[in-house]
Image (cartoon, grey):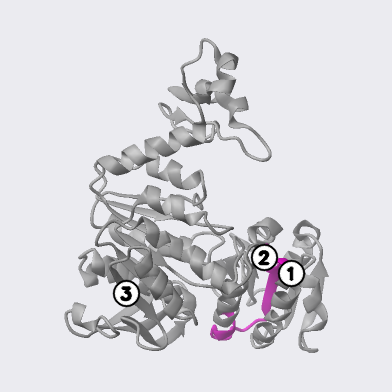
Amino acid sequence: SVDSRSLERGALYVPIAGNRFDGHDFVRSAIENGAVAALVSSENEKRFAGLPVIVVPDTLGAMEDIARAARRRSRAKIVAITGSAGKTTTRSMVQKILQGQGKTHASIRSFNNHWGVPLMLANLPADARFGVFEIGMNHGGEIEPLARLVSPDIALITSIGTAHLGNFEGIEGIVRAKAEIFSGLKPSGTAIVNSDHDHMELLTLLAHANGAERLFSYGYGGKPHMRISDYELLRYGARARLSTGRGEAAEDEKGADEIPLRLSVQGAHMMANGAGALLVARHLGIDAGEALASLAEFRASGGRGEILTLGQGKNRIDLVDESYNANPTSMAAALQMFGSRPAGEGRRILVLGDMLELGADSKRLHLELAEGINACSVQRVFLIGNHMKALKSALAPDIEVHWSGRAEQICGQIANALDWGDEIMVKGSNGVGLCRVVEAIRNRFEGQ
């Protein structure tokens, strides 16, 4: 564990040095809270005389070594997932399917960075049948060492979009960075990619160049190996038809199948996530009926598309909680989903926070949201953050628009502006703190 406060008794505590704190400052607390020992760097050895510590040159490097050992001893089938949007939800969907098939170990929350991935891998049980790991990145070159560490049997890219665009010279840089996940594939490994973008040719080339023996695709357009069609939004879910046995590798499939997929979450992007998870299950030899049953039971987690019905009967509010993350790709998908929801009796309201890490293109990318917002048939929009301010004058004149620089300054106003029958979606980058808005709404209406 890297958290001295929440570790389980008997855990090995690994202090990580970050920008704001050094975990070595909490070694004594970790031992007091039940850690059996702590890894400490040699330069900190003298601070912990008399405590149960293991001295190493570098604590992160030592945790990576433990992770490598855990991977070497494991016979589990390993899945690694990345993408500009949808990676956490897809990881959760794959996890939901695999848990019904045997002991499954998976990343928690968004532990997908340079210390989160080694931490999750180091905790891989020796007897796990499956492992599902999420790998994220902010810059090029970050995914490759993590992919090599995880050494997956299947590597999946959920989407290609402009997340973290400010850290790249263009979209091609993002494509190349995402394709790094294929560099860790085991021999005869399988690549699975969402094909709903304009970069399949480059992505396919990079997949094979990075060692992918087979590549399978899924999406709405063209001829992917698993095509999504007849998408239909339901009041509290969605359904679609998946057609398999198509595409350039159709000969590898056992004939064409038509698969009905129903989810309790909404949005074409969520259906794509489900298709990706189903394709993973297919290549792990899992019965399609069992995988579909697992997906039908899947529920979105807080901040990632969870639909909350507050109140009961006619006295209720539908709250779509997308407060954890936002980039142009996921924002466009969420707006399309919200605008497609069957109209309720009340008003349709949006709360949108800044999309962060977009660099010099930030103003343009925020302004480009106007078309999607205007198409949502919303009556009121609350904008939060300095980047969102540019949208204030770009929205349709019949939309009532409010702006605030900080979420905590407008939480009460938003909650008090709601009434029974309203529908509201809250979406923005996690750093904007829109979870406060969700909390304020829930505090006012939940349990009534």
Q: Amino acid at mark 1?
A: Ala
Question: In the image, which residues are magenta?
Answer: 338-359
Q: Which mark is residue 216?
A: 3
Res 213 quadrant in image: bottom left
Mark positioned earlier in the residue sequence (3 or 1): 3
Q: Amino acid at mark 2?
A: Gly
Mark positioned earlier in the residue sequence (2 or 1): 2
Q: Residues within 10 Å of mark 3 (few under 14, many from 20)?
A: many
Res 205 quadrant in image: bottom left
Q: Is residue 205 above or below residue 166?
A: below
Q: CA distance from mark 2 to mark 1?
A: 6 Å
Q: Residues within 10 Å of mark 2 (few under 14, many from 20)?
A: some
Residue matched to label 1 = 360
- The reply to whether dot 2 and dot 1 touch (C-beta < 8 Å) is yes
Res 125 quadrant in image: top left
Q: Is residue 168 above or below residue 122?
A: below
Out of 205 and 346, give the one closest to the viewer: 205
Q: Could you tell me which residue is drawn at 33 percent across and 55 percent down?
A: 152
Residue matched to label 2 = 166
Q: Does the segment drawn in magenta span residue 352?
A: yes
Q: CA distance from mark 2 to mark 3?
A: 30 Å
Q: Amino acid at mark 3?
A: Phe
Q: Could you tell me which residue is drawn at 64 percent across and 85 percent down?
A: 376
Q: Is residue 417 visible?
A: no
Q: Could you tell me which residue is drawn at 51 percent across and 53 percent down?
A: 110
The image position of residue 169, as x and y in percent, is 64, 69
The image position of residue 308, as x and y in percent, is 54, 66
